[in-house]
Image (cartoon, rainbow, N blue to C red):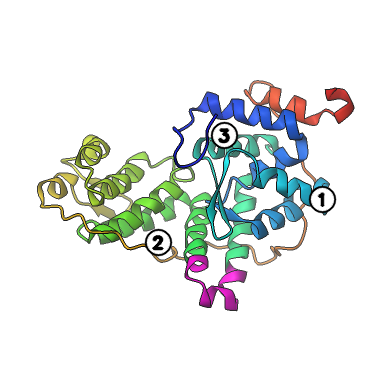
Amino acid sequence: MRFGRDAEALGPAEAYAALERFAQRYGRIPLLLLIHVAVPQGFRADLLNLIKVNFVLEAGDDLTVDVDVLFSPFVESLGSGYYRLDEEVRHQCLILLDSVHREESERRSMAVARFLLAYVSKLARGPEAAEDTLLRDYLSVQSWVAGAFLDPVETAGQFAGALRGVAGANAGARLQISGLGSALSIPLSGYPELIAYAHGLGALASGDRSSAERFFRPFASAGLQIGDVSLPPPAKLLRSRIIVEQAPEHKSPPPPPRAVPVRTEIQIFVSYASMDDTVPPHLPWQGICDHARRTPAQRN
């Protein structure tokens, strides 16, 4: 099965099968790391390792666990040290993550999101971010993603405001906002029309009018109301003369959203409490976790 930008998108059943094969081959601890690293939109090796240290305590300092995740078939290298998890695999991982830790007082995805904000805050203040445009963009997207997990209502309103600001802008700005829509599609899954609006703007920017019409169809004439933000009816954009510009080689995302409160006691090198590795029997993940909990001797 092919993964990556040139492969066909996986469906839920295919993503489940891929994760099952991963669990059978590598076992429980790499699977636990994989489902935790599904929270960020993309990651670097340093973030992967920090998530392991803080959330997958059983892994200790074993770097082979990191390698198992980095070189799994559904992790795509984007170049310059950045990686991205297949979208549907990421979705299924997030379902598993919160199910495995269902007895904790805070959803595990939210705990990882708070950690992600602390990670962003630390790197954003360092000299590397001041000199590295790619890193600044990466941190900006991570801020949006973490905010969407922690406060989807507030983040959806801010994202709607960003969409309104670029609705009549040039093609490059629309492509940027569409890319951010992809990053937010899972944590803002309760706002499918908002994500569709972003994708529609991106399709218009790339000259794909038929895809834009498909994204806009459910609300083409009425527009969208997200909190206090009103987005203009897409019919106006579809009637306007669209000029497709050559997108710049580098496209920065919109500025990070307004800060979501984050508990100040979070330290990105401090380990969290032990984990509960059980899954309710009604979930389709039971087979994966049953295998992942077995010792190597039991699997033979």
Label 3, label 2: how many angstroms apart (C-alpha)? 26 Å
Is 299 above or below relative to 239?
A: above
**Circle nearer the N terminus (1, 2):** 1
The residue carrying mark 1 is: 62
Q: Nearer the viewer, mark 1 or mark 3?
A: 1
The magenta stretch spans which residues? 121-136
Residue 19 image-quadrant placement: top right
SS at mark 2 in the image:
loop
Q: Quadrant of the C terminus?
A: top right
Q: CA distance from mark 1 to mark 2?
A: 35 Å
Q: From the image, state whether disc 1 or disc 2 is nearer to you.
A: 1
Amino acid at pointer 3: Gln
**Amino acid type at mark 1:** Asp
Q: CA distance from mark 1 to mark 3?
A: 25 Å
In the rendered image, the quadrant that contains the N terminus is top right
Q: Is residue 160 above or below residue 22?
A: below
Instruction: Characterize the magenta stretch by its predominant secondary structure.
Output: helix
Amino acid residing under circle 2: Pro
Q: In terms of image quadrants, where is residue 75? A: top right
Q: Is residue 283 above or below residue 210?
A: above
